[in-house]
Image (cartoon, rainbow, N blue to C red):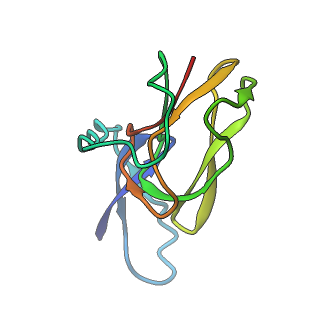
Amino acid sequence: MKNYTITVNGNVYDVVVEEGAGTGAAPVATAPKAAPKAAPKAAPKAASAGAGSIKIEAGAAGKVFKIEASVGQAVKKGDAVVILESMKMEIPVVASEDGTVASIDVAVGDSVEAGAVLATLN
């Protein structure tokens, strides 16, 4: 048996997988546990026009792969603002509502934890 911790859409799961060929056993997932809190950031790494009231947070831990929006840009609900790379997948982090990008608080290459503020909107 092997124990793994997996994060899916910001939810953290402990998973137990039986070892051995031909056992036919499926992985057993336990109830989600609380996601780790993001470490406080010392200062924004990108230019900002002031923090907005709407936070755009990382749904999973990963590395900032690409920044899709810029400060002052108008975005619609569902538009990608930042792209994270996690477990060799590109994960878009989207605007939760219409607004204008007030700040980008990360830079390409930054490692972020689930729940970290990546950007803000007004």
Above or below 95: residue 122 = above
Q: Which residue sits furthest bottom?
A: 21
Image quadrant occupied by the C terminus: top right
Taking the spot 48% from the left edge, 54% from the top edge, the residue there is 107
Taking the spot 35% from the left edge, 38% from the top edge, the residue there is 32
Taking the spot 47% from the left edge, 75% from the top edge, the residue there is 23
Q: Residue 47, how many percent across, how many down?
A: 49, 42
Q: Residue 24, how many percent across, how many down?
A: 52, 70
Q: Residue 13, how many percent across, how many down?
A: 37, 47
Query: Which of the 4 image quadrants contains residue 51?
Result: top left
Q: Residue 90, how many percent across, how many down?
A: 63, 59
Q: Is residue 27 left or right of residue 68?
A: left
Number of numbered callouts drawn: 0
Taking the spot 37% from the left edge, 77% from the top edge, the residue there is 19
Above or below 52: residue 65 = below
Image quadrant occupied by the N terminus: bottom left
Above or below 15: residue 88 = below
Q: Nearer the viewer, residue 20 or 40?
A: 40
Query: Which of the 4 image quadrants contains residue 100?
Result: top right
